[in-house]
Amino acid sequence: MAIKYQDSLKGVTPGKLRGFFVDWPNPPSPTAHLRLLKNSGLVTLAVDDKSGRVIGFITAITDKVLSAYIPFLEVLPDYQSRGIGEKLVKRMLRRLSKAYMVDLICDVPLQKFYKRFKMSPAAGMMKRNYRSQSGARIC
Ligand SMILES: CC(C)(COP(=O)(O)OP(=O)(O)OC[C@H]1O[C@@H](n2cnc3c(N)ncnc32)[C@H](O)[C@@H]1OP(=O)(O)O)[C@@H](O)C(=O)NCCC(=O)NCCS
């Protein structure tokens, strides 16, 4: 299967975004997912070249001076363990290579995955409002 990587949302419709947010009790709809991607500062997608289906995505938000944050990285279950996640992270980190700080939050077992990219473990804090898990107009 040919996979292409793109840093734009060209050709992406909600119908091409099915199957993400695995195990989320109240996931965003594909339409909300597309809105999230449009509103992210930077997005990189892995796309099945034949069908145009999005099979992986990574987003970043940035102040464009010092910092960037990576809120989302996901590869569809059927496509995992083929190096797609690694390619998405590498590509996004390359795009953010001038940023002083690039942060993300992950579960402890995933720290090993991110260490591949010379990222370091760090402590963090977070807050979740589960009523908004499917999407909201934040501001
Ligand atoms: C994390 C994720 C994006 C990796 O995508 P991928 O395309 O499978 O990544 P790669 O093929 O480049 O690397 C796979 C390796 O990542 C590591 N990895 C993936 N998920 C892991 C997990 N939950 N715990 C520990 N290591 C994990 C393993 O070393 C794995 O190697 P293996 O396939 O031999 O077991 C994918 O597993 C995913 O979408 N997970 C669900 C969403 C998620 O956890 N996103 C990260 C948010 S911080």
Image (spheres, rainbow, N blue to C red):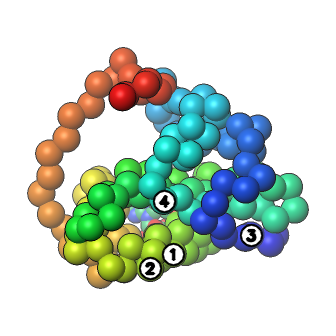
Residue 91, which numbered label? 1
25 to the left or right of 6? left
Label 2 environment density (alpha carbons within 10 Å; few <14, some 14–19, many ≥20): few
Mark yes or no: residue 129 visible: yes
Residue 64 on image: x %, y %: 33, 64
1 to the left or right of 129? right
Q: Alpha carbon of mark 2 to alpha carbon of mark 4: how far?
A: 12 Å
Question: Residue at image x 66%, y 54%?
Answer: 9
Task: Give the SS element for disc 1.
Answer: helix
Residue 23, which numbered label? none
Q: Alpha carbon of mark 1 to alpha carbon of mark 2: how far?
A: 5 Å
Label 1 environment density (alpha carbons within 10 Å; few <14, some 14–19, many ≥20): some
Question: Residue at image x 80%, y 72%?
Answer: 2
Q: Alpha carbon of mark 3 to alpha carbon of mark 2: how far?
A: 19 Å
Give the quadrant of residue 116.
Answer: bottom left
> Do tag 3 and tag 4 residues touch (Cβ < 8 Å)?
no
| Residue labelled with disc 3 | 3
